[in-house]
Amino acid sequence: MGIEGMQEKASDAGIEKAGDAVDQKTGGKGESQVDKAQQAADQKVGGQ
């Protein structure tokens, strides 16, 4: 795995962790919006 693959994994993990933190703080309210935001962030950062 090259540096790009490692960066992608790291960004995915960070985005997932942030989304989980939001879900925990809000008690899961708006979970679908958080999921959409995670996907959008991953596409923007990861380019996929």
Image (cartoon, rainbow, N blue to C red):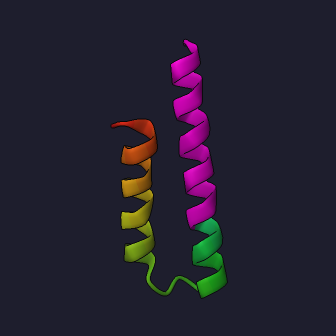
Q: As displayed, is residue 12 above or below residue 33?
A: above
Magenta-drawn stretch, dominant element (helix, strand or loop): helix
Q: Is residue 10 magenta?
A: yes
Q: As displayed, is residue 6 above or below residue 35?
A: above
Whole-percent x, y for residue 20 in the image:
60, 66
Horizontally, residue 42 falls left or right of residue 4, namely left
Residue farthest along the top direction in this orientation: 2
Residue farthest along the front direction in this orientation: 44
Whole-percent x, y for residue 11 in the image:
57, 41
Whole-percent x, y for residue 42 in the image:
43, 47
Please tell me which residue is depicted at 58% across the width and 17% down the height of the picture.
Answer: 3
Give the quarter of the figure containing the C terminus. Answer: top left
Whole-percent x, y for residue 23 in the image:
57, 76
Horizontally, residue 27 falls left or right of residue 46, namely right
Q: As displayed, is residue 33 above or below residue 26?
A: above
Please tell me which residue is depicted at 62% across the width and 49% down the height of the picture.
Answer: 14
Range of magenta residues: 1-19
Q: As displayed, is residue 37 above or below residue 22?
A: above
Please tell me which residue is depicted at 45% across the width and 71% down the height of the picture.
Answer: 34
Total marks placed: 0
Q: Is residue 43 magenta?
A: no
Please tell me which residue is depicted at 45% across the width and 77% down the height of the picture.
Answer: 31
Give the quarter of the figure containing the N terminus. Answer: top right
